[in-house]
Image: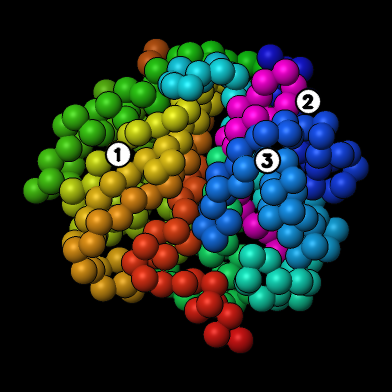
């Protein structure tokens, strides 16, 4: 397991710096689904031309700084061995990136990533670049903000890079239990779900939730409700989650993702955008750290979340890149 994960992690690091060729890590017929405005790329050449090379060109001295890197057997279709990670692409933002004008200063471009590995190469990937986080660092944020805006921290236990302790199955069981209770017992009138908090709940009393730019991060269940859950559920009260293509557990960590994961209608104003009832979808990635010292089934202590808000607002009729550029 350690070799499978560490080789993939090293290959991705070398790929972005140009220290190794793309043929060493990306299969020739690989398919990458990347956040808006990149979207689907088919084949190694397109992936290099439309994703990797633009990152290298835009961010002088580009490198990756991984916070989490886990791997395991995907229990969902299509199965296979997958890696999942939270990282930042770091460099001086000197040239335009996917149309976003540069800040001419350092940036940390947050990213959530899932990779299917076959015969040592990536054959499939899903990547959510949090472009609004780079807009925020450039002081050109076109949407309203709720919670605290911070760079994602590494796990409090500092053991999220190819973990060597813990039970991945137990971690994934904990997360799946939370997700099952969240959806099956949800009350649209009170916005409540069973078994989330308290003695028998899945979340630790001192949980930390790290969200995308616009939503921000928060502390404790009360902070999570105030700075994310209430606003989101008022805006999308009929949201249906799930539809995951990947769920893996590794050590004290688990990760799940859907592309898209949520379907919903826009029924309440959100981050400054007026509701109009239109149907929307949302690409979602969640990464969790579980603590089994708090009980035999574990509790979730930290949750890193990347959401493709560029795509969500594009469905609402807005181009966040154009709006950010107009703020110069």
Q: Secondary structure at mark 1?
A: loop
- Determine contact: label 1, label 3, CB under 8 Å: no
Disc on the earlier residue, 1 or 3: 3
Q: Secondary structure at mark 3?
A: loop
Q: Secondary structure at mark 2?
A: helix
Identified at 40% across, 65% down, the residue is: 313
Residue 41 x, y percent position in the rendering: 61, 47
Disc on the earlier residue, 2 or 1: 2
Numbered badge on residue 241:
1
Which range is magenta?
A: 107-125
Residue 143 x, y percent position in the rendering: 43, 72
Few, some or many residues within 10 Å of mark 3 (<14, 14–19, 20+)? some
Few, some or many residues within 10 Å of mark 1 (<14, 14–19, 20+)? some
Identified at 47% across, 53% down, the residue is: 308
Tell me the CA gap for discs 1 and 3.
30 Å
Identified at 21% across, 69% down, the residue is: 276
Residue 131 x, y percent position in the rendering: 57, 61
Q: Is residue 226 above or below residue 3?
A: below
Tell whether position 108 is magenta.
yes
The answer to whether residue 257 shows anywhere in this view is yes
Q: Could you say which quadrant of the image residue 25 lies in?
A: top right
Q: Is residue 109 left or right of residue 291?
A: right
Residue 206 x, y percent position in the rendering: 42, 39
Q: Nearer the viewer, residue 119 or 201?
A: 119
- In the picture as drawn, the residue positioned furthest to the left comes out as 189
Residue identifier under label 2: 7
């Amino acid at each position: 397991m350690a070799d499978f994960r560490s080789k993939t992690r090293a290959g991705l690091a070398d790929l972005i710096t140009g220290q190794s060729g793309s043929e060493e890590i990306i299969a020739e017929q690989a398919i990458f689904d990347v956040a808006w405005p990149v979207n689907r790329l088919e084949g190694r050449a397109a992936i290099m031309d439309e994703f990797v090379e633009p990152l290298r060109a835009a961010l002088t001295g580009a490198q990756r700084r991984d916070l989490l890197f886990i791997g395991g057997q995907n229990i969902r279709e299509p199965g296979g061995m997958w890696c999942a990670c939270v990282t930042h692409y770091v460099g001086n933002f000197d040239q335009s990136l996917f149309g976003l004008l540069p800040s001419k200063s350092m940036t940390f471009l947050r990213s959530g990533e899932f990779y299917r590995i076959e015969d040592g190469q990536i054959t499939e990937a899903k990547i959510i670049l949090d472009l609004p986080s780079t807009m925020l660092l450039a002081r050109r944020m076109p949407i309203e903000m709720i919670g605290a805006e911070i760079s994602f921290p590494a796990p409090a236990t500092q053991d999220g890079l190819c973990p060597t302790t813990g039970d991945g199955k137990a971690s994934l069981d904990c997360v799946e239990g939370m997700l099952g209770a969240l959806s099956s017992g949800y009350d649209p009138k009170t916005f409540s779900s069973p078994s989330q908090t308290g003695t028998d709940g899945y979340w630790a009393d001192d949980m930390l939730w790290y969200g995308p730019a616009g939503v921000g991060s928060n502390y404790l269940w009360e902070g999570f409700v105030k700075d994310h859950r209430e606003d989101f559920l008022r805006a999308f009260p009929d949201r249906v989650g799930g539809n995951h293509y990947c769920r893996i557990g590794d050590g004290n960590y688990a990760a799940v993702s859907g592309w898209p994961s949520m379907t919903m209608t826009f029924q309440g104003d959100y981050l400054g955008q007026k509701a109009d009832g239109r149907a929307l979808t949302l690409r979602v990635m969640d990464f969790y750290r579980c603590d089994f010292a708090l009980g035999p089934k574990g509790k979730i202590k930290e949750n890193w979340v990347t959401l493709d808000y560029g795509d969500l607002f594009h469905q609402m009729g807005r181009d966040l890149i154009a709006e950010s550029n107009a703020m110069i």
